[in-house]
Image: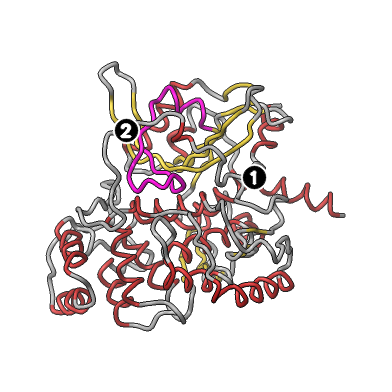
Amino acid sequence: MVEKINSVIRNFNYNTIINPVRQNNYSDNNSSMPSTPSFTSSASIPMSASTVTLRTQLSNKDEKNKYKAVTSKLDRNTKKIVNLLLKNGVLLNNNSNDKSTVLDNLYKIATEPRAKGLSSTGILRDTIATISYPYLITQQFGDIPVSYRQGVIEANNAAKSSMKDPRQKTDEIDVDHSGTCVAASTEFKLAKQMPAEFARFAQELSSRELCTTKDIKLENLADNTLNGVWLLNAFEIPFEMSNYSDAKLKFAPDQNAIIRAQIQTTNKDPDERTPLDVLMQSTFMQIGSQQCYNSITDKRGGKFNQNDKGLIEFEKTFTESVVFDKNILSVTYQTVDENARLIGYETDLGTMKKHLVSALDMGENIIIGYTQTNENNVIVNGHEITIVGYKKNPDGKLTFICNDTDDNISKPVEYSEDYLLPKIHHAALPKEIVENDMDIVPSWIEGVEMYKQLRKQAA
């Protein structure tokens, strides 16, 4: 019965909420950070990443030449940031899918052509700034200047007519409230936890090819090869297989993302997305929405979701699994009835806290979905944020350190455990942390059943 109840809220979209949680209860003891990272680097390499070799000095002529080529394109402040990235081991970090380093990819950005309308120097600076301080990432769309509007309208009309599941209206090109919190949280986690892979994505997505590839293990998607292949086909991810256990996936932003990125290249205002944010978030939205996202309207189609905004939990889990090539479990903590009313929890809050702390101690950043309820305990909003750490208070309770890409605050925010834990609907956690405490149905199993139901309804 519990699974039937929770299947209702799993179809709830997690996107921009009307009343951000930060307005209700958070600790803010520091002044706001500047929009340019003129301070220091906070990028770190997870200690659990055993395949990463920590190097803090350029060791050969090739690296020295690349370093010189990159820094020659930068202003004085950004050069200092690159030097800090070298000293803290991030610049030569190679925890990427093809083992290329952050420096390797910065060099390509600096020396190879970018996609039409993008600035090599701009993408280079944005990549460095984001790796150095991922809290700069935002999901705030920019406005469309008059000079671009007619072209945007025409592109949107073309997208609507060509999409397999068009839900856009041509008059919805001005986006006030973004639904990309899942995508932005994924972007943040990638930048903070895997800087070399983030730099690789940044380089390839902004290149003239406007796409990247990713080698993954199918066992990280499902229990066997056939079910893993089913998932890739269901999400319409282009892929190739060289054997029965591995697949090479192709990721790309939607066809209108380049328009948004071009606008942000020449007309970005403070607190708006960078062109790099546009490309990253579009790519992750495309993955989750079965290749049916439109960057102009911030609307999506797709077979798993009848809502046109944001991503549901199943889509979010799949996106995170393929981007990080990990067996991600979406652990549902809240029990919700068929009317979307919060009626309880799948486990006690102490166990929930133990799960979160264990994952954080492993070096994981945890993307969670939290909910807001009305006076009748009916869920009215959902949003995704990332827990990056915790600290103990004198009373023994915890304060969780989080990042919210929709709060217009370019720094961490803090939430007390008493406030945050009851609001957590689900969390993306490693399987080994929760398997002894809760009976979790893997996301792919629910996806298969969901797809079968949708096909029956359509028949």
SS assignment at label 1: helix
Q: Residue drawn at (57%, 23%), measured in percent from left and top?
A: 345
Give the colour scheme of this rendering. Answer: secondary structure
- Left-right relation of 82 to 294: left
Q: Amino acid at mark 1?
A: Ile
Q: Position of residue 181 (x, y in %)?
A: 51, 49
Q: Residue drawn at (33%, 42%), measured in percent from left and top?
A: 412
SS assignment at label 2: strand
Is any atom of residue 72 visible in this view?
yes
Residue mark closest to the camera, 2 vs 1: 2
**Residue 445 bears which disc, if any?**
1
Disc nearer the start of the sequence (2/1)? 2
Tell me where the magenta segment starts and ends, as one range.
402-424
Query: Is 429 a magenta residue?
Result: no
- Name the residue carrying label 2: 390
Q: Position of residue 223 (x, y in %)?
A: 57, 49
Distance, label 2 to label 1, CA atoms, is 32 Å
Q: Amino acid at mark 2?
A: Tyr
